[in-house]
């Protein structure tokens, strides 16, 4: 089988997380996330968030987290505003709309929304014949591997507060986003109403931790999770993994680790004068190769072909906890050979 | 911590299933259930079903499986008919209704629906001012631990065919249901349009296998799973467990194992002249004790208090793959002591 | 064509309402209910309600009003509690569930819900695995022609307040309900969070006036009406009719008129020793006749056969603004002849 | 009050339609559209469509018609494709999404969708992570007053058939669209799966006739209408108006009448060298004036300010059955004066 750079959920789980699960295999736990290990995990997360004043709930996937949170926040006639490239707009098979809500989009830039985009959307939705924009959705990192800086995020946050909009941050790839930006976990409480900390894409079997800061978003959230089919019977499976991931900064360390490998690839490719589709600083990078190179490379490696562009194809390499420096070096060598072949 | 008979999802996972996962931890897998291990699992399940003519999809929970299947089958103006005690009617926080569909109920008997119940419901929904009943939902085993015999199931099935209703069987506790009844896996293809094989409650970390027999239920089902937020990125985690569970009849063996323990408890309690709330032959039993006994017993064990009844309370004991003969014998001894105390 | 007692919406519109429309046919009006005539109507209604502190919105039908209000009030994981015979439970083809919400039912008595029913339902919905009951739905008059007395309504209202439940009263047949009970329009503001004043069944072309008392139910309600497809372009058509209906008590007078005719029928039938299916004091009555009588009568008149009962069939006669004393007298004579025939 | 060119639903109803209603005021009708007059109307419409092989249902508004039809056609994971300026995308407060479906948009041209737009959208939605496009929505005439020619419509229709997409045509302003294009009523049966004939905007109190050609769209449609809260108790009110409108071509004649007045205005404005925002040939025209002129004009007339453009504002004049040549001539005179003032 070809080595895969296709995604960061191609491998079972990080050994330390697996080990933590195994150690818990001889215990009895309360169901539905009411167990001690989930409580421990929440305490550890709250320490990193530097606040006790939040509710944390574990679910199993990103689309599930997004649909659950967004449908909780919005009133029936309200919509969520997102970048046109946003996961909820493109890759969720209408899961948000299935809960009854329109995803209003603005083009943004580099996969990111700006305050001016929010203003523009609000201006276009001025009376009762249009959906009321009730919240803003962004992700850190974005679909294009870019990240919001603290200042960018603060500007979005202020704009939302000014216009009485909830702000929700999708953190499916938050570990990588944290490692690549100046935005740290203890800042979220002041920046947004809720966000989630992605586990699936950073080495967990599965698991996302939804964090609710705004008091209005807390009541009966467990009812809502169950209503959306997202309340896990063995909630402790996720709890145990988050407990471990937040015990000695494993979560953050893995973020740095995968970014480092992606940066190594990026630098090597830049040295080869390979152009890029986006300015990613995270674990997803989008180099552009000619059709011939892509074809040849796909015989050796598994990866995603992202988009046809003027001079060929943007493809995507994703690094994960499983990726090694060695395999990256090999990849670069193989790319060199193939590019030489088509020079 | 008190020993728990509260549920069959209180313990992580059966050692053989965990072991299978560990052995796969050094592989790369395709995402979203498109991997080889999930394919293997499906082949093994199809062997037991004795048909190739079905589609199988893995999801992570029962409510999720129910909501996904039911909302796929029904047209917007259609309803699902279920027993008033059914999981979808009582314990899913409106998850079915959240997809837009009414759950029409009939009282049934012993947690089971009968053809006469179906006929009664159809008669009451005769024109366009009432929902059209589009399908029937039953579960094997039921919420009360009872099971449908083959003949009962065949009668329901024939009634559904006669009235052009889809039949869906919830198998959250199918292992126990199979072991307790004369209904075997190879019979389902002729009995129903779809069902699911529960994994979470028989020793998996999580996982349910939805089986679709009816060709009309197959197209774009993966789109629908994603639309409902139920498409797991690491689908192979469930696939690997089902592969193991169906490799050497582990699934069925565990069903027998937990039923045997429940029967042991039942027989011992009958010997003590303890009455029961339902005639369960599966891994959930519902003995009735006086309030005083229940209070005393709850100091020693964790269990669910099911319902207040005339002479006290029906409580629920659930056996799982983790339960041992020894702990059951201890429980009986403790009950004897407590009952003696209040004689 | 046979004379119809089938319903109170079999005839176009009361002459005074039609006349009011005709007089407005040479005007230009603002669209979507923002017109002067709708404003006038709202003022007149507020006078009768004896409060300015409410919002009023016009829509075109009862099911539409119910689905719009209920889906506005409830959070996604919440349900509405209603009598099992309630319109929203039986006769709306799942319109409430189509907005995502379960209708929880209690049997009640005579088509009416009692505080004990509410307490019973609340007790059965105790944790996050069950829907949260968020509101209570009742109707005045009920599906069985019965009415709530002020004391009964007050008790329901107090119970709702105690348990923090919204109370919504369906007034599809409110004119008849007002005329038959000691509950008057000026009492609603203290009794419920919202209700609607039915127009379609008391002589309007169509039109229901939703009245929102509770401040939490007011913001963006027009957005919600539009979202539910219920915002009428020519809202003034309904507005003009309500203006007329509330100008000189036409609304209430018609309620008395149709009740008087129904009481005349009831008294005459009692004199004939005809039994009744419910103790109606409004414009729907449910006499019980033998199968033979019903068959014969159905050759002369159009009416609804309500339900098979022990000694024959309960049928329904409905009086409307169009019904005359003469046609009622004729009906009685015809019933006498037919009953004599089968003695 | 200022004379209004704001809309084509500012006036009660065309005198001939009102007269038809009055003549029916002394009859009893079956409820819910099962009456003789609705049947007559359907027969007359079928004659114009030149087919018996279609089902016709009356509802009361455009958004209601759109939401009802689209939610009937689509499977839960499917989306409707529309022009980004489409009514369902912009002006329905998320009513389509409220039924669970995404509105996928393409920019199109002049308010119209082209086969290339459909191909483009299909190409972008290629796997189960994206919504499946299940149908195409267009309108005749469009939001910008433009119309599809027969050849344009045929091309869209062929493209839909090729890709197995349902085609639905919104005819809220169909009378004007018919009068302005070479597309006639008898052509729709070969062009689309369903469409609706708008009544509200051509002189009815309210009323739209949904026409279903495709047999797969017919079963239980009345259930669906009721489920969406759109089944009118007094369906005959709409039936009577459609009966009249289709009796002696009143419907089509009114279309020509309002287009003629709009063309008169257009020609006069062109003579004044007023530029236009779109190339409308129907009863909505979008002249562009400077801010100063718009302000002055708004003191004399009521109209919609459509969009800020480079040289001022595009405003919208809409002609209706109520509009007279005289008032149009006056408007032109007033515009001349105002423009002269700011030269």
Image (cartoon, coloured by chain):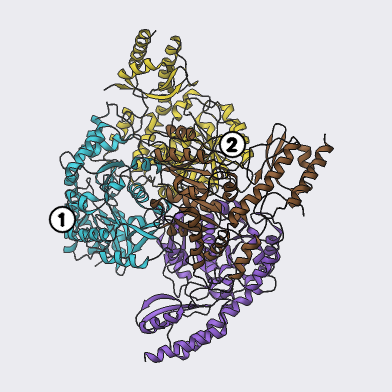
Chain colours: A yellow, B cyan, C purple, D brown
Side of B305 relative to C318 (left or right): left
Q: Position of residue C116 (x, y in %)?
A: 45, 70
Towards the viewer: C280 or C161: C280
Label 2 chain ID: D
Q: Chain of mark 1?
A: B
Query: Percent position (x, y) of residue D200?
Result: 60, 55
Rendered image: mark on residue D110: 2
Q: Which residue is mark 1?
A: B182
Question: In the shown orientation, is residue D249 left or right of residue B337?
Answer: right
Say what secondary structure mark 2 lies in: loop
Q: Is D170 placed above or below B275 here?
A: above
Residue B284: image tag: none
Q: Position of residue D284 (x, y in %)?
A: 65, 45
Estimate the spatial distance between the alpha carbons at disc 2 and disc 1, rounded to whole Å.
67 Å
Under tag 1, what secondary structure? loop
Query: Do callouts 2 and 1 point to residues on the same chain?
Result: no
Residue C182 falls in which quadrant of the image? Answer: bottom right
Can residue C102 be seen here? The reply is no
């Amino acid at each position: 089988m070809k080595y895969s750079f296709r995604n960061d959920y191609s491998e079972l789980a990080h050994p330390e997380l697996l080990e933590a699960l195994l150690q818990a295999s001889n215990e009895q736990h309360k169901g539905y996330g009411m167990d001690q290990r989930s409580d421990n995990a929440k305490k550890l997360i709250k320490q990193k968030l530097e606040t006790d004043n939040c509710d944390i709930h574990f679910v199993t996937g990103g689309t599930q987290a997004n649909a659950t949170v967004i449908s909780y926040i919005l009133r029936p006639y309200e919509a969520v505003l997102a970048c046109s490239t946003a996961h909820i707009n493109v890759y969720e098979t209408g899961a948000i709309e299935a809960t009854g809500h329109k995803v209003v989009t603005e083009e943004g830039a580099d996969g990111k929304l700006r305050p001016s985009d929010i203003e523009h959307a609000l201006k276009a939705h001025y009376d009762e014949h249009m959906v009321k924009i009730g919240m803003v959705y962004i992700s850190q990192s974005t679909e294009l591997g870019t990240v919001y800086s603290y200042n960018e995020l603060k500007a979005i946050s202020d704009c939302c507060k000014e216009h009485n909009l909830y702000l929700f941050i999708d953190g499916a790839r938050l570990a990588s986003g944290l490692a690549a930006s100046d935005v740290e976990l203890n800042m979220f409480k002041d920046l947004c109403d809720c966000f989630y900390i992605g586990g699936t894409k950073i080495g967990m079997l599965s698991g996302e931790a939804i964090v609710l800061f705004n008091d209005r978003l807390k009541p009966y959230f467990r009812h809502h999770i169950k209503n959306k089919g997202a309340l896990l019977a063995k909630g402790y499976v996720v709890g145990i993994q988050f407990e471990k991931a937040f015990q000695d900064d494993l979560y953050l360390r893995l973020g740095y680790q995968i970014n480092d490998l992606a940066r190594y690839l990026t630098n090597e490719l830049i040295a080869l004068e390979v152009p890029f589709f986006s300015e990613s600083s995270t674990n997803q990078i989008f180099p552009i190769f000619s059709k011939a190179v892509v074809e040849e490379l796909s015989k050796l490696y598994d990866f995603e072909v992202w988009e046809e562009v003027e001079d060929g194809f943007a493809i995507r390499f994703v690094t994960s906890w499983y990726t090694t420096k060695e395999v990256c070096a090999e990849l670069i060598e193989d790319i060199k050979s193939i590019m030489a072949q088509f020079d």
